[in-house]
Image: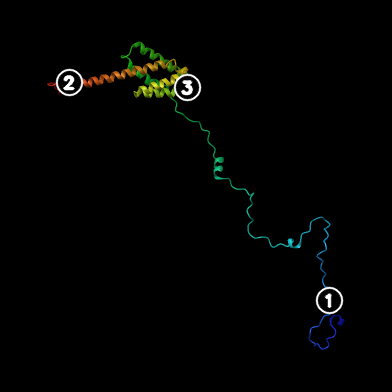
């Protein structure tokens, strides 16, 4: 067996020299055989694809939290959340109701001021028209717009704003003629009579002031102590 492992012809080698292996032994043993690169590998019988060894052997899984997904749920915007969570309350809009007394009482007071300065027939006609106004107001035959405008008319009348009161009267006759036609004639006449009365009072005051001034300027006339 030594001839298979030791190369012959080297008689002078020392006892501790490594043996020289024979080339024939190496060719007989052949070592591990390798698959030729040109040979095709047969497909597996179960039909599953073969995965190369380089792809199957992967490194350890990455450490740390997984990357965020684009499909992950995101919180809604603040504006949309507030708009969806806060709902407007269906609260009734409260409007101050115009009272009949607040309108009728100043008109009756103006009529009383005109009595004694205006013909009785005219004052009686105005009184009847005001009674129709009270009846229709109490019967719910007047709209909210008419009531509000009448309240404004009375304010202007009490402030001696004759032109403004007359303009409101004209707007009522144009916009709500079917509601106000029966009694608005009396209100118009009352505005005119109150205006004339105020003009007369102002004229009398100016006349009295002028007479007093003239009386003071007369020579030899002194005021009583």
- The residue wearing badge 1 is 26
In terms of sequence position, does the residue under pointer 3 or pointer 2 come before the other?
3
Label 3 SS: loop
Label 1 SS: helix
Q: Which mark is residue 160?
A: none
Q: Which mark is residue 215?
A: 2
- The residue wearing badge 3 is 143
Q: Position of residue 35 (x, y in %)?
A: 82, 66
- Dividing the picture into quadrants, the one containing residue 45 is bottom right
Q: Are marks 2 and 1 in contact (CB under 8 Å)?
A: no
Which of the pair 11/174 is nearer the observer? 11
Mark 3 crowdedness (10 Å alpha carbons): few <14, some 14-19, many ≥20: few
Which of the pair 131/149 is nearer the observer? 149
Q: Are marks 3 and 2 in contact (CB under 8 Å)?
A: no
Q: Position of residue 101 (x, y in %)?
A: 40, 22
Quadrant of the image containing the N terminus = bottom right
Alpha carbons under labels 2 and 1: distance apart:
163 Å
- Dividing the picture into quadrants, the one containing residue 59 is bottom right
Query: Which residue lies at the image location 76% right of the left edge and 62% below the top edge?
Result: 53
Q: How many marks?
A: 3
Query: Which residue lies at the image location 37% right of the left edge and 12% below the top edge?
Result: 124
In terms of sequence position, does the residue under pointer 3 or pointer 1 come before the other?
1
- Dividing the picture into quadrants, the one containing residue 161 is top left
Relative to 149, 66 lies left or right: right
Q: In the rendered view, would you say 104 is above or below 42?
A: above
Viewer-nearest of discs 2 and 1: 1
Viewer-nearest of discs 3 and 2: 2
Which of the pair 147/176 is nearer the observer? 176
Alpha carbons under labels 3 and 2: distance apart:
57 Å
Q: Position of residue 107 (x, y in %)?
A: 37, 19
């Amino acid at each position: 067996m030594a001839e298979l492992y030791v190369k012959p012809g080297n008689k002078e080698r020392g006892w501790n020299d490594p043996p020289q292996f024979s080339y024939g032994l190496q060719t007989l043993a052949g070592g591990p055989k390798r698959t030729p690169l040109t040979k095709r590998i047969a497909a597996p019988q179960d039909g599953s694809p073969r995965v190369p060894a380089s792809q199957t052997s992967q490194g350890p899984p990455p450490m740390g939290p997984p990357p965020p997904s684009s499909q992950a749920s995101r919180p809604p915007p603040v504006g949309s959340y507030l708009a969806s969570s806060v709902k407007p309350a269906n609260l009734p809009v409260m409007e101050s109701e115009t009272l009949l007394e607040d309108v009728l009482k100043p008109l009756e007071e103006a009529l009383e001021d005109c009595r004694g300065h205006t013909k009785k027939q005219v004052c009686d006609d105005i009184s009847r028209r005001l009674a129709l106004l009270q009846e229709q107001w109490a019967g719910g035959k007047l709209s909210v717009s008419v009531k509000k405008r009448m309240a404004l008319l009375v304010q202007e009348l009490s402030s001696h704003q004759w032109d403004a009161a007359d303009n409101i009267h004209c707007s009522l006759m144009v916009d709500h003629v079917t509601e106000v036609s029966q009694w608005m004639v009396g209100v118009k006449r009352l505005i005119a009579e109150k205006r004339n009365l105020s003009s007369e009072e102002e004229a009398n005051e100016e006349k009295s002031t002028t007479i007093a001034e003239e009386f003071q300027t007369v020579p030899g006339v002194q005021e009583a102590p």
